[in-house]
Image (cartoon, rainbow, N blue to C red):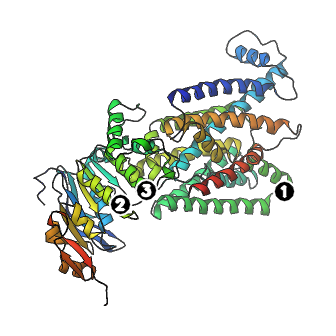
Amino acid sequence: MDGGGDVGLRAEDVSWAVGGRMIVDGVSVEPRTGDTVGLLGPNGSGKSTLLRLLAGVRPASSGVVRLDGDPLGALGRRAVARRVAVVEQHSATQVDMTVLDVVRLGRIPHRRAWSARSAEDDEAVRDAIGYTRLEDRVGQSWHTLSGGERQRVQIARALAQRPRELLLDEPTNHLDVRHQLDLLALIARAPVTSVVALHDLNLAAMFCDHLVVLGNGRVVAAGTPAQVVTEKLIADVYGVRAVVTPDGPDDRPSVRFLPTGG
Amino acid sequence: MTGIGTRGTAAVWTGGLALLALSTAATITIGPAGIAVGDVWAVVASRFGGAASGLTPIREGIVWDLRLPRTLLAAVCGAGLGVCGAVMQSLLRNPLADPFVLGVSSGASTGAVLVVVLGVGGGAVSLSAGAFLGALCSFALVLLLGYASGGTTDRVILAGVASMQLFSALTSFVVISSADAEQTRGVLFWLLGSLSGASWGDVGLGAAALAAVLLVCAFTTTALDAFAFGSDAASSLGVDVARVRLLLLTATALLTAALVSVAGAIGFVGLVLPHAARAVVGSGHRRLLPTTALVGALFLVWVDTAARTVMDPQEIPVGVATSLIGVPAFVVILYRGRRMS
């Protein structure tokens, strides 16, 4: 977790509490530039909240999130949004928009009020659409897209922001296996530093360079997939028995769960 | 944000403005006095330093003191309510939101009945001033309740509903317990919205408020676009959500309060016309807000003309006329909303 000094997005001992309950409790994260970092942990372990703190959408109760050394709070929302893009777990709108309209939202942080779209805006949008292979969908209505397509469009919107850091909250939720693999491959090869909250340990081991495991708002393990995804950790964090073998791609860990209580 | 391109939008605006100017002149001629479009131009020209209109003082008065301010006030109210409705719908992410959703009209009605029925202010406060103050009280209560309970969109809407209920109940209580038949009729007529008392002062007030809000909107159109996927998404797109939301809620509430205080609560304009405008130019606010203003102005100019002429000499409150047209449109929106979700 060497952030290379003051470069990139890093959380330093951040906490966030609501109603006296610590949701995130003294977490530090320093993704290495260009890495895809997987955020693991059971439901309610604080993954989504940590991502919101990293995005600056919520201010940390204590600790600080820094972007190239500057606290997020001192940078202003626009400056942060030009660097850090967010894809939420579930995106919904009542507005009737096309795919192109949604991707163009990503240019908002780069535009001044009442200014027209620039050539750079159009180029960023075109690149993002090309990267996510949505060329033949640009005119389609958002409301007619499947869940997997919507997530792809949101990733295109995030990339249109031309971020250097991309934060994703369980982007593969509710997607079929094919879409999960496609989407994570897309994220892993994107030229950005990504932090992805995930539930599926096999997918995390397969696509992430580095894993951080949260339990009750604290970091309980961090390291490469081989260091983190172990039978002992799965038993400790999830309370589930599993067999872990180095059978994944590039000898990465592969998890086979065993029935509980049996 | 689907819809026609930039050139199409320019055509819609140019055509809309021309149509509005024509409609203003045309509707002034409609009515029992039998005035021609040429007479309208002559009167306007003479007031701006041209030759005398050649009309009798009474006919000139009908054009300049009655019909012209009334038509212009209709245009201002239609534009203002339309814009407020569009902003509320985007900001609260609710296609069924309208300018009155934060209790402004209910507060205004309470203020109005306090002045008219109970004589609060001892004659020093006009009905309009009472309505305006009432509207501000109601909006302040909504902000207080909404922000004290967390400031999320849902909380603000719920606070609006609570405030609306409270002030409606207060209005009813005052009317039932104290008003005589004549007062009740007058208050009811005002509550339903009426442009019959339009003066140049009302036009000036409304137009100034409208201009100020359009200016605020000009600087927040991209921020409003960013709210499409919710306030967290808007925040991650670089929008200072708390500041933009408070600014726009306050601006639209003040405009709505000003319009309600001069013309009563004219319903459905702010609910339905933003949807009509979206169907024409798409949901990007840079095009949507000016288009909504134009469509709203045109709509209310003609509906008010219908309201004062179809049952002549009896006048229908314009709010009743807009609702008679608005309710079927509302049903269509509900139906489409159900299909979409």
Quarter of the image holding residue A194?
Answer: bottom left
Q: Report the front residue among A31 and B182.
A: A31
Give the spatial CA distance, label 1 vs label 3: 54 Å
Residue at the spot of label 3: A91
Q: CA distance from mark 1 to mark 2?
A: 73 Å
Question: Few, some or many C-alpha atoms within 10 Å of disc 1 (few <14, some 14-19, many ≥20)?
Answer: few
Does residue A59 appear anywhere in the picture? no
Q: Secondary structure at mark 3?
A: loop
- Residue under numbered circle 1: B180
- Please state the chain letter of the residue tagged with numbered disc 1 in the rendered image: B
Residue A261's spot in the image, x, y percent?
31, 90
Report the residue at 27% width, 55% height from top.
Answer: A185
Amino acid at pointer 3: Ser
**Image quarter hosting the C terminus of chain A:** bottom left
Where residue B181 sits in the image (x, y, percent)? 86, 55
Q: Is residue A50 left or right of residue B126?
A: left
**A258 left or right of B240 in image:** left
Determine the residue located farthest toward the top in the rendered image. Answer: B51
Along the line of sight, which residue is nearer the eye, B297 or B35? B297
Residue wearing tag 2: A178
Q: Residue furthest bottom?
A: A262
